Image (tube, rainbow, N blue to C red):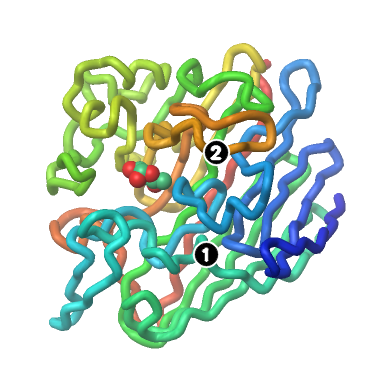
Amino acid sequence: MHSKTTPLSIEGQSWNEYTLKNDNGMSVSFLDFGGIITSIVTPDKDGNFENVVLGFDDYKDYLNNSNYFGALIGRVSGRIANSTFSLNGKEYQLPENEGKHHLHGGPDGLHSITWQVELVETATSTGAVLYHTSLDGDAGYPGTIKYKISYTLTNDNAFTIDYEAFSDQDTILSLTNHSYFNLTGNLKETVLNHEVKLDASQFIELDQELIPTGRLLPVTDTVFDFTNGRKLADGVDSGDPQNKVASDGYDHFFVFDHKAEENVVVTEPTSGRKLTVKTNQPAMVLYTGNSVDDSCTLKERQSEKYLGVCLETQSTPASLNYPGFPSIELAKNEVYRHTTTFTFSTLS
Ligand code: G6D
């Protein structure tokens, strides 16, 4: 187990890249800027260690990261319709950064701040704690938030993100990480041949602007039924209106049933890689990179549509407008706790 720190100078800004490495040779690298995960290196079935996430080749591109590659997301992941919400009878106006809507915490969200990082080694893990304080009114949100986010890698090839946050006022908060996974290794091909299994029997319907309509749809007898495993390619030309709305793919909030051992299992047949996800969150956005075009120069190659799949565990801002959805409210002095573990293995 060990870690290293690499100082960087990016467009005059001083960043650091941290690399956590376990005894099996698996590594996770990330920046203090945006908490951005720049690479995760894992073995395939033949022991070839390759990168399994999308990341820029030139790190200055993270300053204009409209795909949010690898980034921490907040204060609120997803879309807040019309960039407004009310809390305790008060109306709040947030910056509009996708049409009239507020996406992923706005232009100055957590993806764009530089975190204070402390490396942490234990007998069984190597990791880091990322700290930040966001002041009352930051990006239009109420409450001063103290964040403490931990990245931890163990010798089980498990990478855990623990999010803790604390507010001095009632507010809203829903954090996630926006890594794009690609288990082929070094981005050999798109993720359309990945098989995904989800412990989820419902998902939220989206309108043409990708805003939740308030309806929970059953997955039964649709290409949204991942309960027994399904290729992501099924969502490309299904003709299902909900795939069409998402630019011929998935970009949807699946509500976990929390009945299965694992919430998510992703496998890739050629490499034999397997990724399982366990989380305490009520749901997850499954996003197949439908808006990724060929304009990004990544470490291994140019980007393209469907090159990565995002597994964004979270609650939903739809709860601001519809009853019955997992809430994103955080009461004054309540501690926000979100933990998600990504475990990498190979098919036996
Ligand atoms: C697109 O609709 C998708 C979002 O879900 C994603 O997070 C973003 O691109 C990066 O807006």
Q: Position of residue 255 (x, y in %)?
A: 30, 42
The outermost residue toward the top is 270
Q: Mark yes or no: residue 229 visible.
A: no
- Residue bearing mark 1: 112
Front residue of 234 and 188? 188
Q: Is mark 2 on a helix, strand or loop?
A: loop
Question: Badge 2 is on which residue?
Answer: 296
Within 10 Å of the Cα at label 2, are there few (<14), some (14-19), or many (20+) other Cα atoms? Answer: some
Q: How crowded is mark 1: few (under 14 residues within 10 Å), some or many (20 or more)?
A: many
Classify 328 as above or below 256: below
Nearest the camera: 32 or 64? 64
Residue at screen point 22% across, 41% down: 204
Residue 158 percent across, percent down from the top left: 67, 43
Mark earlier in primary sequence (2, 1)? 1
Residue 150's quadrant in the figure?
bottom right
Residue 9 drawn at (x, y percent):
75, 64
Q: Does the residue labelled 2 lie within 8 Å of ligand 1?
A: no
Name the amino acid type tagged 1.
Ser
